[in-house]
Amino acid sequence: MDIRLDAMDRKILGELQRDAAQSLDEIARKVGGSKTPVWNRIRKMRAAGVIGQQTVILDPEKLGFEACFFVLIRTSEHEADWQQRFLSALKARPEVMEAHRLAGEIDYILKVRVANARAYDEFYQALISEVRIYNVTALLSMEEIKSTTMLPL
């Protein structure tokens, strides 16, 4: 479904990104619209897939996930079977917050959240026992300077 977004749609999306728990009345007031048309726009954007799953953002450190590692993976294997096993292994690991396939010398980068270095090692050992990996480099984030889920609308 092709959807064209106008300025009002972008304002609504901006408000939803800031706080999706806002009431419809609040969103309508902030974007300068009325409740029913704003609701209809939100429904239309959901149906088109512009708005996906709604969730909450948790504080990882307050929940004991104090270590964030960025894991750079190089592989010498590019067959479909290997890739399928690798992707299945990543999807099954809740520690993997993000995974990206890259262009360039590094094939994949993972964002991994764990309690500490020992927990990272357990993750690493489990991953390499499931799939063969040519080279793994783990970078520990010393400080999170910026993190956002908001797109620059």
Image (cartoon, rainbow, N blue to C red):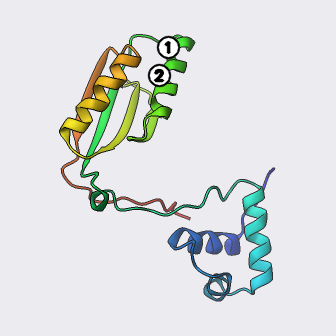
Above or below residue 153? Residue 94 is above
The quadrant holding residue 13 is bottom right
Q: Residue at x 55, y 12 (%)?
A: 81
On the picture, is 90 further left or further right than 114?
right
Q: Residue at 54% x, 61% y: name it.
A: 55
* Spatial CA span between label 2 and label 1: 6 Å
Note whether residue 105 is visible: no
Q: Position of residue 28 (x, y in %)?
A: 68, 84
Label 1 SS: helix
Q: What is the quadrant of residue 5 in the picture?
A: bottom right
Q: How many marks?
A: 2
Horizontal side of 5 relative to 148 (left or right) equals right
Q: Which mark is residue 14?
A: none
Label 2 sits on a secondary structure element that is: helix
Q: Position of residue 18 (x, y in %)?
A: 51, 72
Residue visible at 75% across and 84% down in the picture: 35
x, y (%) of residue 105?
35, 22
Circle 1 Cα neighbour tier, 10 Å, few/some/many (<14 / 14–19 / ≥20): some
For the C terminus, the image quarter is: bottom right
Instruction: Determine whether label 2 and label 1 are within 8 Å by CB.
Output: yes
Q: Which residue is mark 1?
A: 82
Q: Nearer the viewer, residue 74 or 153?
A: 74
What amino acid type should be assigned to the residue bearing mark 1? Trp
Amino acid on which disc 2 is placed: Phe
Characterize the local packing of mark 2: few (<14), some (14-19) or many (20 or more) Cα atoms within 10 angstroms. some
Query: Would you place residue 57 above or below residue 72 in this image?
Result: below
Residue plotted at (33% across, 56% down): 60
Residue at label 2?
86
